[in-house]
Amino acid sequence: MKISLESLELLDAIEVRGSFSAAADALHKVPSAVTHAIRRLEEDLGVALFERQGRRAVMTPAGRTLLEEGRYLLQAVGDLECRVQRVATGWENELRIAVEGAIDIARLLPLIAEFDREGSGTRLRLGHEVLGGCWDALTSGRADLAIGAGGDPPPGGGFAQQLLGQIEFVFAVAPGHPLASHPEPLPVREISRYRGAVVADTSRQLLARSAGLLAGQQTLTVPHMAAKRAVQVAGLGVGHLPRPMAEAEQAAGRLVIKKTEAGSPPTPLYVVWRTHQRGRALDWFRSALARPEVRQQLLW
């Protein structure tokens, strides 16, 4: 067989990480080993999977087809591993957890340490998702559990959920930004004059969602909440941040919290899983995330 699961995992890592060297780091390989493996696969198949564009290696249409179809095989094999493990012990081989970007993953680490003491052998894979990304991750099968999913679920059902809690977002700008000295509450028309800092929705299959955007407002799109905070601290954009994050920056003199005419009601976040999903690791996390002290820790 010319195509192995290892080669498909390698292609996936290159696509996700953006480069051969980053994929090598993620897979704990040296860059030369990755380059050699790709060349060997191209020779075996008799097709070019990548082509050079300047200093970058860009996937060819043939490479893209192999990756997209190969991902179905990787998912099928992963699902098979999980099913076999569950049949034998009840513990999943791997539990994939999608975490909403408004939740600091560092606050989840004590819970992971507690889970490790169970000695289950279940591998944990954490994914960073934004806006509709948690729902998309569950729908597409790249996650078994979502922590912090917000908004309405996609049509079709098949989900179970429990309330994690509510998170409050506040509008914040850099001290030197023109809006910092503007009288409160800030009118929508005044805010729309300035560029907004926006975190990109991570959905791959579902329609991307947006939050806090105003009609006609210019935007600077960033990959995660930490980058959004950095943009606002630098005065390069305005927008809403989780209240504890914004208050910490305000206490340090790097941001100013401003009231707006529109306001921003608290956003409910949920723990969500697919109704057909079974497994002791999933049950453990569902139970743990229902504890008040855990919910409070995750939501600042």
Image: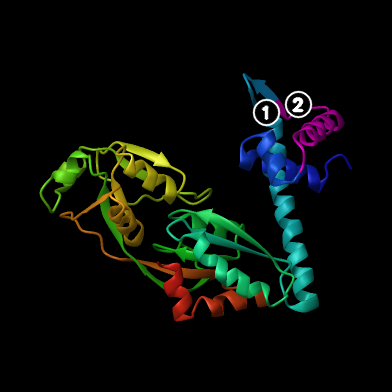
Q: In the rendered image, is residue 200 in sight? A: no
Which residue is more in the foreground, 148 or 104?
A: 104
Q: Position of residue 45 (x, y in %)?
A: 83, 32
Toward which corner of the image does residue 166 lie, by quadrant? bottom left
Q: Compared to 270, does 254 lie above or below? A: above
Say what amino acid the circle numbered 1 marks: Thr
Q: Is residue 105 left or right of residue 174?
A: right
Point out the stretch of residues depicted in magenta: 29-50
Image quadrant assignment for residue 59: top right
Query: Above or below — where is 66 with respect to 275?
Result: above
Q: Is residue 150 above or below residue 210?
A: below
Given residues 34 and 46, the one toward you in this image is: 34
Q: Is residue 250 visible?
A: yes
- Tell me the amino acid under the disc marked 2: Ala
Q: Residue furthest right?
A: 1
Residue drawn 49% across the image and 52% down it: 206
Residue behind mark 1:
60
Q: Secondary structure at mark 1?
A: loop
Q: Residue at x 36, y 41 (%)?
A: 231
Does the segment drawn in magenta span residue 83? Answer: no
Quarter location, residue 41? top right
Looking at this view, is 72 or 155 the one in front? 72
Is 32 one of the magenta-colored residues? yes
x%, y% of residue 249?
A: 32, 53
Please, is residue 229 above or below residue 127 in the view? above
Q: Quadrant of the C terminus?
A: bottom left
Residue where numbered disc 2 is placed = 48
Q: Residue at x 63, y 74 (%)?
A: 115
